[in-house]
């Protein structure tokens, strides 16, 4: 799978910023830059992870998470191998070059550690605070053959139903 990061960067940098005062525009520009950087890292991370999984003979990885009451964590990382067997991801002996550390060319890290870091980054970007109050839970699915990462997220909330009767 080949991703043209320059084309993605060009598309992201040409999004218009709304007009307003200079201080507000500076804040918007900084947030735009942060989101652009996060998007490029997510694309680079996805490509690196899927390539490493393919090298290791993995077809699917599922990562489940849960959080509430100001605490959240990943519960389980499972890998499905080419022969259909399911094993804990920690048993897959593959490493991946870190995509988020360009200063030293990126360090190699175990695939389980890389996927956990990638998932936490995406959770922070897409559902920051999932662990607060009633919390949230969900699943990441990495499908190597399709070249996709699917996040299914569920938010919990407290609700009530009011019924009034005039008697």
Image: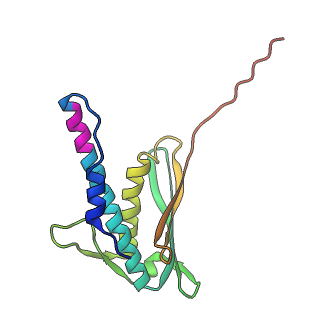
Q: Is residue 114 left or right of residue 89?
A: left
Q: Is residue 30 magenta?
A: yes
Q: What is the x, y in percent for residue 153? A: 53, 53
Q: What is the x, y in percent for residue 147? A: 46, 72
Q: Residue at x 45, y 57 (%)?
A: 73
Q: What is the x, y in percent for residue 18? A: 29, 35
**Which quadrant holds residue 7?**
bottom left
Is residue 78 in view? no
Toward the bottom, the furthest residue is: 83
In magenta, the rendered stretch is 24-31
Q: Residue at x 30, y 55 (%)?
A: 11
Q: Is residue 54 left or right of residue 86?
A: left
Q: What is the x, y in percent for residue 126? A: 42, 50
**Colour approach in the figure:** rainbow
Toward the right, the furthest residue is: 167
**Which quadrant holds residue 122?**
bottom left
User: Can you say whether 22 is above or below 101 in the image?
Assistant: above
Q: Residue at x 46, y 48 (%)?
A: 131
Q: Main secondary structure of the magenta part?
A: helix
């Amino acid at each position: 799978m080949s991703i043209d990061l320059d084309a993605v960067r060009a598309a992201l940098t040409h999004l218009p910023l709304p007009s307003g005062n200079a201080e507000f525009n500076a804040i918007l520009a900084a947030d735009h830059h942060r989101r652009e950087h996060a998007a490029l890292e997510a694309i680079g991370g996805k490509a690196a992870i899927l390539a490493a999984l393919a090298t290791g003979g993995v077809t699917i990885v599922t990562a489940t998470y849960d959080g509430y009451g100001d605490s959240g964590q990943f519960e389980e990382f499972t890998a499905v191998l080419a022969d259909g067997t399911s094993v804990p991801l920690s048993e897959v002996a593959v490493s991946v070059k870190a995509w988020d550390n360009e200063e030293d060319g990126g360090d190699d890290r175990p695939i389980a550690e890389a996927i956990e870091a990638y998932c936490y980054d995406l959770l922070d970007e897409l559902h920051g605070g999932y662990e607060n109050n009633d919390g949230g839970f969900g699943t990441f699915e990495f499908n190597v053959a399709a070249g996709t990462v699917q996040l299914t997220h569920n938010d919990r909330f407290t609700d009530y139903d009011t019924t009034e009767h005039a008697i």
